[in-house]
Amino acid sequence: MPIQAETTPTDAPAAAGVAPTTSSTETGPDAVKPSRADTLLAAFTSFRAELDAHHAQRERIVKLSRDVTALSKQLIFTLHRVGSGKGKRAVFDEAEAKMDGLRRLFDKLQGEVRGADFWRYERSVSPGIQEYLEGFTFYHYLEHHTLPTLEQAQASLFPPAAPAPAPASTAPPASTDPSSPSSPAAEPAPAAAASGREPYFRVTVDDYLGGVADLTGELMRLAIASVGKNLSDSLAGPATECEGEDKGFADIDRIGTLVREIQGEMTPLAAYARWLPKKLQVLDQSLAKIENASYNLRIRGAEYKDSPAMLQALARREADSGGAGAGAGGRDEVAA
């Protein structure tokens, strides 16, 4: 009996101690800790949501980039009507309306490529921005006969400046004469960046060079189209050398000089941009067509100066052989 009395108290605490251990396992912190499978499932669910958001955002960006490309092509086609009989100012007004439409598209695109997303999706939007820059540089060349700088290209994508509040002082107002140094119109276009405004889209050096390289195809078209006009002007004699407001646009020699300079500046950069060698091939073809057209203008024009019908036939052959081939085909080849 004493042995049993000693055994019972010993077993009772042992039995009593088992129940609390089991209870603490079910209701303690270890009971709510997720398993490894649950952790992996939650992680991959998060990855799926992130990838879905990425693909949806990329689709929106690609669609906007395609819209920019399509409207930029319309801008280029509009600009090619300069010198076709329609007033220069009317063509530029129509082109400016398309530029406003492009800025609205870039305004929508701005919200999709903020911060680090710009470099994440830069390759998706690069074809559209290069097409826009091709149209903008063509517009700038037709208006100023110069190639716009990178800063000027970037300034074209700044939103319009908000009207400044009226000054409280009684100082005389600033002059509105564009030639006046104090006039806002006399400030260079890149100065827009100093006002604190954020551009709709950042123009990179690569995209700028790509747009300028594509511009040479449009300059080639302009030069080829000008052959007929130059041949016709040569028949009219020196009296019309300075007549016609659009004669400067048909200066094939000036176009050839500009394209040759672009070729010389871009050729050393071919090793630093993966797409530039292909664009340089198209540029070389465009330059060859311009030089051939200039040869025909000078040599054949003198040979057939007494035969207007032959000159017009020559102009048509030049336009048919060089107007639609290398420019558009070269861009498609590069885009592919």
Image (cartoon, helix red, strand yellow):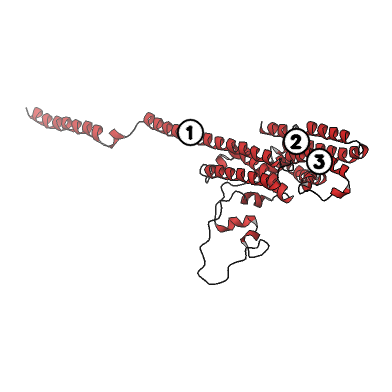
Q: In this view, does 40 lie to the left or right of 226?
A: left
Q: How crowded is mark 1: few (under 14 residues within 10 Å), some or many (20 or more)?
A: few
Marks 3/1: CA–CA distance: 57 Å
Q: How crowded is mark 3: few (under 14 residues within 10 Å), some or many (20 or more)?
A: some
Asked whether 15 or 69 is in front, the reply is 69
Q: Closer to the camera, 239 or 276?
A: 239
Q: Which amino acid, mark 3? A: Lys
Dot 2 alpha-carbon crowd within 10 angstroms: few under 14, some 14 to 19, many 20 or more: many
Percent position of residue 86, x then y: 71, 42
Instruction: Give the mark nearer the N terminus: 3 vs 1.
Output: 1
* Marks 3, 1: nearer the viewer: 3
Residue carrying label 1: 51
Measure the alpha-carbon separation of dots 2 and 3: 25 Å
Under tag 1, what secondary structure?
Answer: helix
Mark earlier in primary sequence (2, 1): 1
Q: Are marks 3 and 1 in contact (CB under 8 Å)?
A: no
The residue at which mark 3 appears reads as 229
The total number of labels drawn is 3
Comparing labels 2 and 1, the label whose residue is closer to the camera: 2
Residue denoted by label 2: 282
